[in-house]
Image (tube, rainbow, N blue to C red):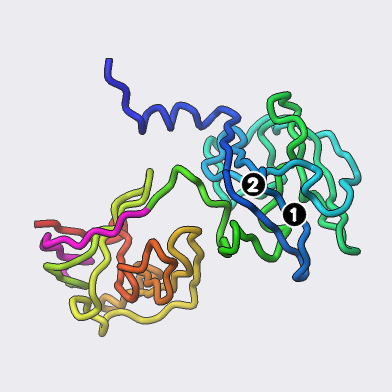
Amino acid sequence: MATSLDEVTKSQVGLLRWTDMRRRVRAFADGQVVVDSAAPIQVWEPHRVVGCYAVPSADIVGPLEHHTPTLPPAEHPPILTPAHPFALHTASGATYDIVANGRTLAGAGFRLDDPDLAGYVLLDWDAFDEWREEEQTVMGHAHDPYQRIDCLPTSRHIVVRIGDTVLAESRHPTLLLETHLPVRHYIPREDVRMDVLERSDTVTVCAYKGQATYWSAIVGDEVIPDVAWTYTDPLHDAEPVRDLICFYDERVDLEIR
């Protein structure tokens, strides 16, 4: 019987998972190194779709204090994203404060009870000011070694509408394919009705593409907030979509011919 790898991945979301990272990882607070590990792993607690870095306790500068036994809550969302706090643990273990360089990072460390991961400390991304893999700064969240981006120029003819209003029409968009996520269509600005878009104050960060700024659409008397976005200074993998505009397919009418 053939096996869908997508279905295999989905079926494992409820499990405690880990993988070897095979790279040096460092974390900084107030400009000083708190974590420096040549043997990191990445751990996904049950129902987490984005993992966190975990390192041997010896690779943390300073002691772990205030051991607090932690059990999974009786109820939690079926899928946990980076929007859900690190403190929401779905596997049993103990929470610790990390004390380093005269500063206490409250609840920034978590040791699992699972014997296969004994000796490792899971780290709260948001407790630190900066993360690096080797000398590359990492933004957003830990890099998943099984995640990738492909940017493919295409000759497909696409039209983006809201109701009867055409927002964009292009015969040379770029498809951005990201593992386990919907295909996105990035459109050159000359093919977009910039007169019906206005800048939003919204900014988001993607670990693989960089920082995105957003656009709202004005259709008649209606403002549709944050319906499109742009990467003006993308990370390396997303360089082909620099300054292009992408619309939420699920919030517009997208026609692909």
**Residue drawn where x is 30% and y is 71% of the image:** 245
The reply to whether discs 1 and 2 touch (Cβ–Cβ < 8 Å) is yes
Q: Position of residue 218 (x, y in %)?
A: 30, 77
User: Helix, strand, or loop for circle 1?
Assistant: strand
Q: Nearer the viewer, residue 78 or 33?
A: 33
Quarter of the image for residue 168 reads: bottom left
Q: Position of residue 102 (x, y in %)?
A: 91, 64
Quarter of the image for residue 29 reads: bottom right
Position of residue 254 relative to residue 118, above or below, is: below
Amino acid identity at mark 2: Tyr
Q: Which mark is residue 35?
A: 1
User: Helix, strand, or loop for circle 2?
Assistant: strand
The segment highlighted magenta reads 149-164
Q: CA distance from mark 1 to mark 2?
A: 10 Å
Q: Nearer the viewer, residue 232 or 169?
A: 232
How many neighbours does mark 1 have within 10 angstroms: few (below 14), some (14-19), or many (20 or more)? many
Quarter of the picture containing the N terminus is top left
How many neighbours does mark 2 have within 10 angstroms: few (below 14), some (14-19), or many (20 or more)? many
